[in-house]
Image (cartoon, rainbow, N blue to C red):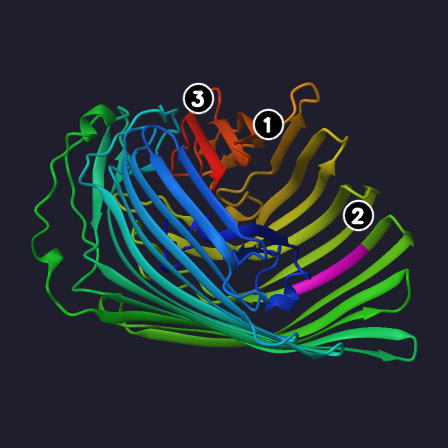
Amino acid sequence: MAGVNGSAVSVIEIDRVEILSGTSGFLYGGGRVGGAINYVTKSPTNAPLRRLTFGNYGGTQFYGHADISGKFDNRGRFGYRANLLYQGGDTAIGEPVDQKVANVVLDWHVTDTLYADIKYTYNDYSKEAIQPFYYMTERISIDTSKRYSPKWTSNDIESHKAYTSLRWDPSKYFTLRSAFFYQDTRMRVNQISLNQQVDRTFIPVRISNSPWEKHENYGGYIYLDTRFSTFAVDHKLTLGYSSTLYDYFVRGNGPVSRSGTSLSLDELKNLPEPDWGASFGNEPLSSVWVDRYDNVLIGDAITFNDQWSAMVGLNYATTANKRGGFYGDSSYEKSALTPSVSLLYKPIEEVTTYVSYMEALEKGSIVGNTYANRGTVFPPLVSKQYEVGLKYDISPNLLLSTALFRIEKANQYSDLATPIPSYVQDGLQVHNGVELVLTGKVTDNLTIMGGGTLMDIGVEKSNNPALEGKKPTNAASRMGKIYAEYALPWVPGLSLTGGIYYTGEKYADAANTDKIPSYTLYDIGARYTTRVLDKALTVRLNVINLTGKDYWQNDYTLGTPRTVAFSISTMF
């Protein structure tokens, strides 16, 4: 699915996901405190790749995926990669899904020091009978294994995305890297929002309908890395600029609301489709808001000796927004000079300790269509993060890390007003916490990825004294997870997998009267790799939410039901 701004990344174009902690993400172009998620997309392989995968995502959602890659020439200068996916059928709760994705990559090693690529992704996605949003007066358990929406509710997306990158290493002292992307997304969403009544029935207070709307995303960066030494101190200095632009177009008056009589959840599935009338107007698309985010940065990764190193940097960030049309005319532009600094010390080769501080200018959030003040853009704020931590390489393949941190950021929440709530920004969320993470191979056969976080969270500097000291909405104080793979030594090629994921209780409302219960989810699976007709063959089976736990992902969204997925991959 696409995000609220129309941006989307398909699973088949991702090679791996990198988690960048706060200061390590700084040299990638500013960003947010707490770090960033970097999707590394697929590139052509040096060796020929021909892989077919057939599988099922759960329910009757069968899919086929082809991944083909290699080089056009004997010298390996020109490469290609193509990923094609078709998915169709119903989810585990009977939501019809249809998806077609095509991802094509071409790259060119122009010289030994100059590399360029171009990538294109087309995604056509449709999902019917999407689950409603729930606004609760009494937090109850709802059976997540059932579908409650009529089929005419839907989420339809068509996206075209092109992106290109260039890297030039003229010498061992200099690297120039740049990239640019453009994404055009058309979306249409019909979704029901429900208000719970005292008798535990629900009134559909909003049936959001969006005629096809358009989202355009542009972005790019250019960075110069230089490596040099001053006396015995080594430097990697980065200078750069990055920018993103988002433009939102819509027809007519955008989403509309409809009210209805009180219904049970079982009756909701038979709710007739409203007469949308003029909401499907033929008016031309018009821009209703534009977001811009720019960064100019300088950063230096400094190595004093084998034990001491540091990273210092400054980012001059500018965020701007302009609204118009039915959202009303308004605009803002704010700039801030935000620092990042980290000091590292290695008492022994296997241990790294660090202390860091960073700030980030975060753009104002855009209120979504499920709220009465939809389209409101909150003012930008500077968020802060303090952290001290330790990383211990227990072995070459096993890493233990721990950290104490404090994060200060804007506090945002639903006011739960009836019949339709508004989204509010007021005060600061303060997260004081500790985390512990262990990843890697414990033995030759056992691999684990696990961790836990404990936080003391609260609201400060609120305009409403009643909110002071309350916990932010949708933020759990305790979280933990462990995922493990065990390769059975007596059955070559067979690995058993499993995971346990815990999320502590949290609150749905700013006054902390609506408590969302904690939950623990269990996944199990198996993977078997062998060779058939001298070709690699891999069979996977996974059961998600093994116990069928009913839970709330957040204040208005149900959790994922028990889902059985499987796939078979083979080379050809």
Q: Is residue 315 rendered to the left or right of residue 10?
A: right
- Name the residue nearer the viewer: 542 or 534: 534
Residue 496 on image: x %, y %: 60, 24
- Kindly check if marks 2 and 3 are in contact, taking CB atoms under 8 A apart as contact: no
Q: Main secondary structure of the magenta part?
A: strand
What x and y, as percent, mark residue 236?
76, 73
Residue type at mark 3 is Gly
Viewer can see residue 402: yes
Name the element at disc 1: strand
User: Comparing marks 1 and 3, which lies closer to the viewer?
Assistant: 1
The relative height of residue 363 versus residue 519 in the rendered view (above or below) is: below
Q: Which residue is mark 3?
A: 548
- Tell me the residue that label 1 is attached to: 497
Disc 2: which residue: 391
For label 2, the SS is strand
Pointer 2 with pointer 1, Cβ within 8 A? no
C-alpha separation, residue under disc 1 versus residue under disc 3: 18 Å
What residue appears at the point 46 percent right and 53 percent down from the top-left corner? 13
Q: How busy is the neighbourhood of tag 2: few (under 14 within 10 Å), some, or many (20 plus)?
A: some
Give the residues in magenta: 354-358
| Mark toward the start of the polypeptide (1 vs 3) | 1
Query: Relative to 410, does residue 554 appear above or below in the rendering?
Result: above
In which quarter of the view is residue 204 placed? top left
Alpha carbons under labels 2 and 3: distance apart: 36 Å
Please state which amino acid type lies under the numbered disc 2: Lys
Residue located 76% across and 76% down the image: 172
Q: Give whichever of 8, 337 is nearer the camera.
A: 8
